[in-house]
Amino acid sequence: MDQPSLYDDDIVTWAEQQASTLRALARRPDLSNILDWENVAEEIESVGRSQISAVEQQLLQTLIHVLKYMSAPRAQSTRSWRVEVIAFHAAARRAYAPGMRRRIDWDWIWKTARLQAEASLQMYDDHLVAGLPDRMPFTPDELVAESLTMDWALERLAATLNRPTDHH
């Protein structure tokens, strides 16, 4: 095999390559039709999709906790939110592969994080901070960087807020 570590390094790209190869083999008339080529290829692709989904969910939870902390910094749960950001971010970083970058729906993660953070805050009569951008304010590289911390994310997010300007 010319790329023995691709499975370990980027399972999404590996799964796509394997599925593509299986589909090419399925078109060969000299091979047996006993194997259900298309469904085997689909199953292999689903491995990649499930990995992407896992990373999306970890990043989603990271952002939900950052948004809650920014919106309710005096809430009783802020300590646990900090700990959870570390845990969710570490899990996302561990599972993230370069082949996922163009397949992850970054804006969906942001919009969903905003909705879920708002719903969670409303349970305690808090609200999401005003002026948040409509689109993902972090780049993919920033979200999966080892250096992402709660404080960095809060500072970076605060810089993106659309604050109303005073006209005196």
Image: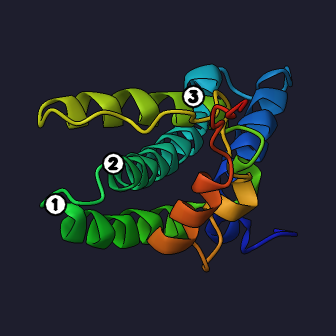
Residue 39, relative to residue 117: is it above or below?
A: above
Nearer to the camera, 41 or 120: 120
Real-space CA distance between mark 1 and mark 2, rounded to the nearest whole angstrom: 9 Å
N-terminal label among 1 and 2: 2
Foreground: disc 3 or disc 2: 2
Residue drawn at point x = 51 percent, y = 44 percent? 56
Pointer 2 local density, CA inside 10 Å: few below 14, some 14–19, many at least 20:
many
Real-space CA distance between mark 1 and mark 3, rounded to the nearest whole angstrom: 25 Å
Q: Which x, y percent locates residue 158?
A: 59, 54
Foreground: disc 1 or disc 3: 1
Q: Which x, y percent locates residue 5?
A: 72, 74
Question: Disc 1 designates what residue?
Answer: 77
Nearer to the camera, 96 or 88: 88
Residue 56, relative to residue 33: is it above or below?
A: below
Q: Which x, y percent locates residue 18?
A: 72, 45
Q: Residue 68's mark? A: 2
Horizontally, is 6 left or right of 35 in the view? Answer: right
Labelled pair 1, 2 in contact (Cβ < 8 Å): yes
Nearer to the camera, 1 or 138: 138
Q: Quadrant of residue 162?
A: top right
Residue drawn at point x = 66 percent, y = 20 percent? 33
Colour basis: rainbow
The amino acid sitting under disc 1 is Ser
Horizontally, is 17 left or right of 8 in the view? Answer: right
The amino acid sitting under disc 3 is Trp
Nearer to the camera, 131 or 109: 131
Real-space CA distance between mark 3 and mark 2, rounded to the nearest whole angstrom: 18 Å
Residue drawn at point x = 77 percent, y = 27 percent? 23
Q: Residue 108's mark? A: 3
Pointer 1 local density, CA inside 10 Å: few below 14, some 14–19, many at least 20:
few
